[in-house]
Amino acid sequence: MLQRKLYRQRYLFLMLAPAFLLVLIFNYVPLVGWMLAFKRYQVGLGFWASEWVGLEQFKRFFMQSTDYVYLLQNTLSINFMMIITNLTLGLLFAVLLNEIRRRFFVKIIQTVSFFPFFISWVIIYSIANTFLSSSSGLLNELLMKWGILSEGLNILGESKYAWPLVILLEAWKSVGYISIIFIAAISAIPGEQYEAADIDGATRVQKLKFITIPNLMPTFVVILILNSGWILNSNFELFYMFTNATNWEKMEVLDMYIYKFGLQQLNYSYASAVGIVKTIVSIAILLSVNAFSKKMTGKSIF
Amino acid sequence: MHYKVSPGDRVFDFINYLIMILVFIVMVFPFLHLINYSLSNPSLVSGKFLFYPKQFNLDSYRAIFANPDVLNGIYISLARTIIGTSFMAIVTSMAAYVITRDDMVGIKFIRRYFVFTMYFSGGIIPTYILIKSLGLVGTFWVYVIPSAVSVFNMILIKTYIEGIPKELEESALIDGANDAYLFARIILPLCLPVMAAISLFAGIGQWNAFIDTQFYNAMHPELFPLQYVLYNSFQTITSVEQFTNSMSGAEKFRMLTPQSLKIAMTVITVLPIMLVYPFLQKYFMKGLLLGAVKG
C-alpha cells in the first residue's frame, strides 16, 4: 500500500529532492559544527580527531578576557537602537505620508524612499565616504570652506561618531521599506473610527494621535518581536564596512569578533564558542521582548 | 472624501509637505551628487553640492571600462545574478509545490524540516568549514549552491499556490497528468506574479552580494563580482596611474583623481538597480506585503 503510494508520488519526491538535500547539507550539517566550540580544533587533526576541552573556550571568553563587556554593549545597544529608530521613523513617515492627498506626490515620495533598501552596503559606504570622509568629504570641505572648522571631522573613523553613524545610515536605508508595512496597516483601520471623531469635531492632529497611531501599535510590536530574534544576525555587511582600526571599541559587534577570530586568525573553536554565546543572547532577547510586550500591551506571538 | 479646510489644516499640510520634500532631498540627492561627480572635471568639484555636472566629460567611465578587473567584475556579477537566481527559483518552487500537497507521504515532517531552518543556523564558522571541505572555496559555485534554497521564498510560493482553486489540480489529475506535468504546465504558469517577485528580490541580492566573496574567494581575483571590485578599490586605488597603467593612452586620464574613479565605479555598480527599480517597484511592494502578511 505504502509502496504503491510512494511509487505514485515518485515525481513529487524527485521535485523535493534537490531542496531537501541542499537544506540537509547547508543548514543541518553545520549544526554539528557547534561541537567545535567544545574542542580545541587543530587544522592538521581535522574536526573529529581534535581534542575535547569542554567549556574551556567559553571560560576564555568570559573569564580570561573582558572582551564580552564591550562586545555585548555594542551589539545590544546598536541593534536595539537601530530597530527602535527604524520602527519609530517608519511609523511617523507612514502616518505623515498617508495625510498627503496628491496621489502622484505620494507615489514619488514612496518610490524614492524605498530605493535605498535595494542597494548594497558597499555602495552606502561609498556614498558615506563621498559626503563624510575627513579629508575629501563634502561635509568637511564645506565646514572648512565656511570657516566653521579648521580640521575635518573624522566621522567614519572616530569612535564617538560610531553609533549615530550606523544608526542613521541604517534608518536611511530601511525607513521607506518599513513605512510600506505601516501604510498597509493604516489602510486596514476601520473608517467608522474617523467618522465618529469627525462628528465629535476632532482636528487632524488629534485623529492621528488618538486613532491612527494607537491602531498601529500592534503592528509596531509584532515587527519588533519578529525582528528582535534575529537582529544579531543581520547587517553583517554594515558592520564589516564601517568597523575600522580607530572606531572598533564602539563599533565591533559579536559577528565581527567571530569573523576576526574565526576566519582571520583561524581560531575556529574559540569563534564557534562566541557564536554559541551569540545564539543564546538572541534567544534571550526574543523571549524577553515577547514577555515584556505581553505585560505592557497584552500582545505577544508566543 | 470631503474635507473642511481649517487654518490648522493648512499649517499641518504646509509642514507635512515641507517634511516630505526634505525626505525627497535626503533620499535622492546623494545619488544625484555621485552621478554628477562622476561626470565632472574632478578639479572643479571640491566643496560643492552638485546639482549638474561641472565641465561634463566621460573620462572616468572611459578609464573604468578600459580596466580588465572591472569588466571581469561585471561579467561575474551578471553570471551570478542570472544563474544564481534561476537556480534558486527552480529548486525552491519545486519544493514549494510539494509542500502544498497534503497527500504527500511524510508531509508534516517535510514541512517542519524546512521551517526549522528559519530559526536555527550553523553560524559563520561551521558553515565556512563545511563549504571549504566541500571544495566550493575558490569556485564560482559558492555563489550559487549554498543560497539555492530559500525557505522564506518557499513559504511565499506555497501560500500563493494554496490560493489557486484545488479543482484545477484535481481535474488535471483525473485527466491522467502526472505530478511533474501538473506543476510545470498548470501550477507554475499561474504562479508568475509570486515567482517574479521572489526572483527580483533574489536577483538584487545576488547583484549586491560581496561578503561571500570576502569569505570564500578573496584569493581568487578572477571570481570577484563588481561589488567586490568596488570594495577593493576603496583600499587599492591610491593613484590614477596605477589604475590605468596597463592601458594604452593612459596619459589622457591625467586629470582624473582616485576619488573620481571610485565614484564612477560606484555609479556603474548601482546603475543596473536604478534602471530596473522604477519598473519593478510594484512587484517589490507586492512581494514585501506577501511576506509581511505571512510573517
Image (spheres, coloured by chain):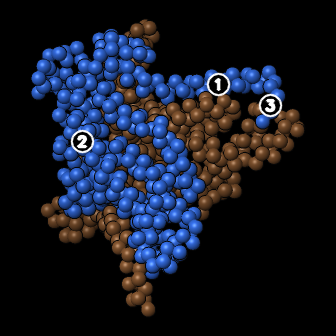
Chain to which mark 3 belongs: B
Q: Is residue A215 visible?
A: yes
Mark 2: secondary structure: helix
Residue A103 appears in which quarter of the rendering?
top right
**Disc sitting over residue B3 in the figure:** 3
Chain to which mark 1 belongs: B
Q: Could you tell me which residue is drawn at 32 percent across and 25 percent down?
A: B263
In the visual, does A38 lie left or right of A278?
A: left
Q: Could you tell me which residue is drawn at 40 percent across and 62 percent down?
A: B92
Mark 3: secondary structure: loop
Is the residue under label 3 in contact with that under label 2 (CB below 8 Å)?
no
Q: CA distance from mark 2 to mark 3?
A: 56 Å
Q: Colour of chain A?
A: brown
> Which residue is the site of mark 1?
B17
In the visual, does B162 lie left or right of A118?
A: right
Q: CA distance from mark 3 to mark 1?
A: 17 Å
> Which residue is the site of mark 2?
B75
Chain to which mark 2 belongs: B
**Residue farthest right in this picture:** A200
Quarter of the figure with the N terminus of chain B: top right
A71 or A46, nearer to the observer: A46
Quarter of the figure with the C terminus of chain B: bottom right
Q: Amino acid at mark 2?
A: Tyr
